[in-house]
Image (spheres, helix red, strand yellow):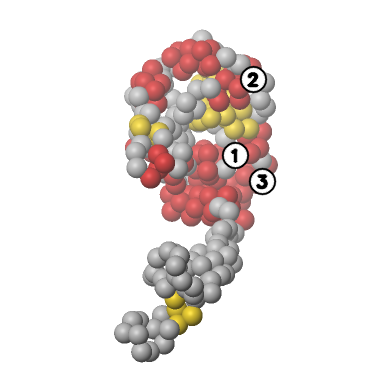
């Protein structure tokens, strides 16, 4: 299958053969499994001090006072004296079932499954119906996947990157991610997540010659070297079909093991 290669002016300069990896089977179940397994690797185990809420002089008054026999703080003439302590479900008491740091939060996935999920996620970027179902505005895009000349790796200014999107008929996509900033409220805002940003295009290149700096300043846009590509980048939120701009050299810079795996599946 021949696909066009565009320059920084949005003009077709040549056509190249699309690698076989883009024709692999679409496996959303495998992509979802790999995403959550890889996502769990960034979770930090956390727990409570086993003695939290138990460091107290509280003792039970036993019977004879007409009150419950739970442990109460010793002393007189201070606010805590006589209050229940050292047990769960009381004011300033311990937690009933606190989280423990020994809990296993890291999920494991077989190496072959992880590689197959990455191959399938790459193949999903070439399926127009999958990319469109994820919410990307690609009605005016000529062909998927979008392949650009290696000059894209040298773009160092955000306005130049935005101009490239316009020339590639991605005006609606740029508007979608610019309008996709949604303010949050409640607990999420109190914890530092004041707004939510829509996910935009992903740029994959063989090397970073300035494009990383330009994409960092563009909300929703991200640059990833081809050798570091994973399901976390291609399927944010475990939803495959992210719009990807590939540099021409990135197609050959993908890990060789992926091409070997595709050849094994094809045979």
Q: Is 248 located above or below residue 47 in the figure?
A: above
What is the quadrant of residue 153 in the picture? top right
Frontmost residue, 1 versus 79: 79
- Can residue 22 be seen in the rendering of this structure? yes
Q: Which mark is residue 257?
A: 3
Frontmost residue, 79 versus 113: 79
Labels 2 & 3 near each other (Cβ < 8 A): no
Residue 215, horizontal then vertical, whole percent = 55, 24
Residue at the spot of label 2: 210
Frontmost residue, 41 versus 236: 41
Secondary structure beneath dot 2 equals loop
Residue 53, horizontal then vertical, whole percent = 51, 67
Q: Tell me which numbered mark, 2 or 1, is placed earlier along the sequence.
A: 2
What is the quadrant of residue 195 in the picture? top left
Labels 2 & 1 near each other (Cβ < 8 A): no
Q: Tell me which numbered mark, 1 or 3, is placed earlier along the sequence.
A: 1
Relative side of 62 to 40, left or right? left
Secondary structure beneath dot 1 equals loop
């Amino acid at each position: 299958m021949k696909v066009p290669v565009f320059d920084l002016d949005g003009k077709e300069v040549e056509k190249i053969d699309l690698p076989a990896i883009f024709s692999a089977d679409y496996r959303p179940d495998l992509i979802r499994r790999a995403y959550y397994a890889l996502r769990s690797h960034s979770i930090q185990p956390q727990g409570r001090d086993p003695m939290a809420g138990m460091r107290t002089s509280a003792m039970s008054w036993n019977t004879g006072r007409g009150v419950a026999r739970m442990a109460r703080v010793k002393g007189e003439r201070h606010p805590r004296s006589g209050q229940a302590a050292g047990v769960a479900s009381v004011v300033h008491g311990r937690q009933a079932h606190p989280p423990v740091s020994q809990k296993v939060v890291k999920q494991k996935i077989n190496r072959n499954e992880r590689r197959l999920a990455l191959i399938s996620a790459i193949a999903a970027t070439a399926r127009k119906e999958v990319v469109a179902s994820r919410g990307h505005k690609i009605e005016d895009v000529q062909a998927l996947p979008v392949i650009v000349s290696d000059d894209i790796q040298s773009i160092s200014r955000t306005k130049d990157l935005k101009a490239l999107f316009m020339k590639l008929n991605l005006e609606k996509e740029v508007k979608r991610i610019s309008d996709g900033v949604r303010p949050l409220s409640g607990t999420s805002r109190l914890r530092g997540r004041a707004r939510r940003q829509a996910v935009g295009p992903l740029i994959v290149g063989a090397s970073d010659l300035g494009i990383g700096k330009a994409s960092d300043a563009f909300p929703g846009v991200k640059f990833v070297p081809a050798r570091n590509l994973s399901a976390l980048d291609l399927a944010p939120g475990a939803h495959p079909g992210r719009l990807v701009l590939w540099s021409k050299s990135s197609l050959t810079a993908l890990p060789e093991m992926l091409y070997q795996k595709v050849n094994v599946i094809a045979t």
